[in-house]
Image (cartoon, grey):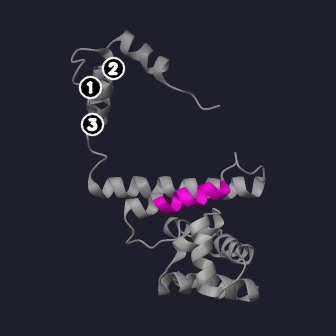
């Protein structure tokens, strides 16, 4: 139990007591200790115990405040991807993953048939995918050659290597033959 966790829980309880402060809190930086709020929303027993030690309130009161804070501040329609996951832009991919997991434990459509929660879960997944792709791009992980070393002359290796070539090289070789032209349409997955 740390002072930072107490700050986030206190902010959530204050917000529940005074919902008129939502606009102010949306523009303010997130309080430290948002992870405790995510754990409370996910009904984690250890988090309920920690929150009870901080403020001596019933677990349901702490959970209600945490959920209200998450819905109004983190999952607001104008929140960026980092804020949706309850972090700032200095967060590591491990922290992002942990926060995403707690949010989905609470919002997952298989656990609740509430369509509102399903929409919120979709926002969480979109934020997670956006941040994950951004982190990988910054780390240079998007510029890799697929590992298909076991099948040196297989067609899947050739397709994978062709996909890593610049577009100018790809089109000249594929359009050179009628078979290449037909394969373009066979491999294309058309959206419904």
Q: Residue furthest right?
A: 114
Helix, strand or loop at disc 1?
Answer: loop
Residue positioned 32% across, 31% down in the render: 163
> Which mark is on residue 148?
1
Q: Position of residue 108 (x, y in %)?
A: 66, 51
Mark 3 or mark 2, which is nearer the start of the sequence? 2
Looking at the image, which is closer to me, 171 or 159? 159
Residue 32 in magenta stretch? no
* Alpha carbon separation for disc pair 1 and 2: 8 Å
Asked whether the residues under the numbered discs 1 and 2 touch, taking CB atoms below 8 Å apart as contact, a structural biologist would say yes
Horizontally, is 78 left or right of 81 in the view?
A: right
Residue 104 in magenta stretch? yes
Q: Which residue is mark 3?
A: 166
Looking at the image, which is closer to me, 43 or 84? 43
Question: Bounds of the magenta span?
Answer: 98-107
In this rendering, the answer to whether 19 lies above or below 163 is: below
């Amino acid at each position: 139990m740390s002072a930072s966790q107490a700050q986030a829980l206190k902010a959530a309880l204050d917000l529940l007591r005074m919902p008129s402060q939502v606009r102010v809190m949306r523009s303010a930086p997130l309080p430290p200790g948002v992870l405790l709020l995510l754990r409370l929303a996910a009904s984690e027993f250890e988090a309920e115990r920690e929150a009870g030690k901080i403020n001596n309130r019933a677990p349901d009161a702490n959970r209600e405040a945490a959920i209200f804070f998450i819905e109004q501040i983190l999952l607001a329609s104008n929140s960026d991807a980092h804020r949706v996951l309850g972090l700032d832009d200095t967060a590591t991919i491990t922290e992002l993953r942990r926060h995403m997991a707690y949010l989905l434990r609470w919002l997952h459509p298989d656990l609740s048939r509430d369509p509102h929660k399903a929409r919120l879960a979709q926002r969480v997944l979109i934020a997670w995918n956006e941040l994950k792709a951004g982190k990988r791009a910054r780390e240079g992980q998007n510029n890799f050659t697929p590992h298909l070393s076991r099948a040196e002359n297989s067609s899947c290796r050739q397709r994978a290597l062709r996909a890593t070539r610049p577009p100018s090289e790809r089109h000249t070789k594929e359009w050179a033959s009628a078979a290449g032209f037909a394969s373009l349409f066979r491999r294309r997955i058309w959206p419904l």
